[in-house]
Image (cartoon, rainbow, N blue to C red):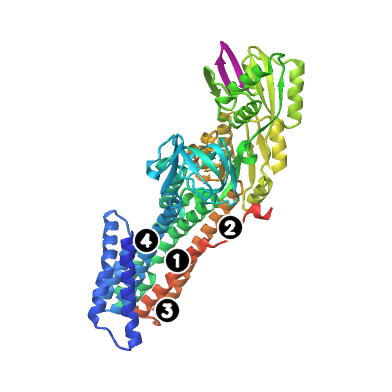
Amino acid sequence: MRRKIVWESSLIAALGISLTIPWYAKAAWNTEVFIVLSFLGVIPVAISAVRALVKRKVTIDLLASVALGFAFIAGEWYSAVFINLMLAFARLFDAWTEERVKRILSQMMKYLPEKVKIKKGEDVAEIPLSAVREGDLVVVEAGDRIPVDGTVVSGQASINEANLTGESELVIKKEGDMVYSSTLNEGGSLYVKAEKVGSDSRLVKMAALVEEASRRKARGERVADKFSEWYVISMLVFALAGYVFMSNRQMVLAILLVVCADDIAVAVPLTFTVAIARGARMGMILKGSEVIEKMSKLKFVVTDKTGTLTMGKPRVVEVRDWEKGSKKEFWRILGMAAGSSHHPVSRAITEYVQKQGEEILAPQEFQEAAGEGIEVKGEGKTWWLGKIDYLTKKGIKLNAEQEKAVAEARDKGYGLSALGEGKKLRGLVELEDAVRPHAKKVIEETRRLGVAKWWMLTGDNERVAAQVAREVGIDEYHANLLPEQKIAWIDRIKKENPGMVGMIGDGVNDAAALALADVSMAMGVIGSDAAIEAADVALIKDSLVRIPQAMTLGKKALGIVRQEFVIWGVTNAVGLGLVLSGVMGPSWAAAYNFLTDFFPILNALRLSGVRIDSVAKRA
């Protein structure tokens, strides 16, 4: 790619010099100079046109080759040089577009350190990053870049994750927290157990997604390609008809020179590439230009509750134990039931039990019913932990006191997780999960951007769902849903509401529902491989603010693409008018096309600096 850029740059320099020096020196070059440069320039154009024709495709390069052929026949070497200058610039911009993506990836990779400190026994050794293996204990001191994805074993530090999430706010990491390669330790020290290194790290996977996304074509790009085919054929027929009826080779050549449309062929994909790069810098991976188009047309949004509208970090408020036995035994059973699950509620219960000073023991058998609860066996007994309905299915009955406690907790808007043993309800855990600070403002902003309705689908109870829906401004909610019921609701919503339907979830528990939506958005994917793979839009940080930003970015990109077609249409119409009225001949037509080619391309580059406002900043 770099060789191509060097070649095109050298050709542009030679063509530019051949056109400008005679003007400054007020003397003409020998015709041989123009001939040599013209033939050098036509080689890549002709090769590209032939390759496309072999694949039964008609491209702009075919039109350019015909124009160059007319210029050679007519001896219009100034025109030929201008055509080649225009085409070389188009190829350079195309190469630069690909190089831009590679540069983004290399910038992501440059944050990885070359040397890593590893603790072995009492000694600390410095080894190359490539020599680090899973399970190694990595030492990360203040000022160091974290070299691997892993879990903090000991220590505490302030970590800057801006290069992954787009957020400059420091995150405190302590024992048990996950840290990610390339992030910066700005204060403190950590011992990190390496879990993912090299190509398995989150950073490398994100970089691969950005590269893959830049290759995916959207409808806008496909329309541009189709337009190019019909346009080229129409212009060739038009030029041939002009030659037959007017017998004026100069006029035909001038027309061909004006209508070469390399600017559109470069500007449209360049716009989407810039948008993907802009999104990556903001902490969101938009998987291809088609996703950008979909986000711009989002009409309906379906969301989960936990981890999307709420923080996804439930906190234990109260624990009730109806058995009069040992508290230590109760904590042990509760910890064993919750400890093998990765559900946010289970993690909250596990942390709470650990704070009571109890060790989390592994059960002999463990089985989890997604969205319902957990069954564990040990010591010859069976326990269940989960929703009240899940426990009643297992034959557990609540007495009057327990039913009253459940009703009171639900009235307060608390989530519930019940522990059952045998035929009895052993205990009840009451939890709360805070609503995200900007959730309501985000929903209001998406409405201003064109979203007509929001649904919330949750496995939580009716009262908790109602409270969250009122607080954030959800139009319609459905509670106590199992994963398969969420899928059924997504299907129903799509059938009853014509328009683009988006789904927001965590990419793990909601993977099937996400796959069914027109455009899927997974939050907080920095910690989840499944989420990165599942979603069309992968939000690195678990921030709802990125949703309206992605919509805005999509609308800006589509707006710029439309502007590019308008600019191209206006400049071509003006150029054709000047040619047909006899004002411009071939040389001026080539110069005119060369200069106006830059308008749509420069317009595409504007997207890098367009303001994408943030709800959080205005809140």
- Measured along the vertical axis of the image, is residue 23 above or below residue 477? below
**Contact check, label 3 and label 2, Cβ < 8 Å:** no
Residue nearest the viewer, comparing 160 with 558:
160
**What's the amino acid at mark 2?**
Ile
Q: Residues within 10 Å of mark 2 (few under 14, many from 20)?
A: some
Check disc 3 and report its element: helix, strand or loop.
helix
Q: Residue at x 26, y 74 (%)?
A: 37
Mark 4 and mark 1: span between their CA atoms?
13 Å
Q: Nearer the viewer, residue 27 or 9?
A: 9
**The residue tagged with tag 4: helix, strand or loop?**
helix
To which residue does mark 2 refer? 612
| Residue 416 sits above or below residue 151 on the image | above
Which label was assigned to residue 601? 1
Image quadrant occupied by the N terminus = bottom left
How many angstroms separate mark 4 from mark 2 (CA)?
27 Å
Distance (Cα) linking label 3 and label 1: 23 Å
Residue at the bottom extreme, as displayed: 26
Mark 3 vs 1, N-terminal side: 3
Q: Residue at position x 37%, y 41% from top?
A: 131
Q: Which residues are magenta?
A: 373-385
Q: Which amino acid type is marked by label 1? A: Ile
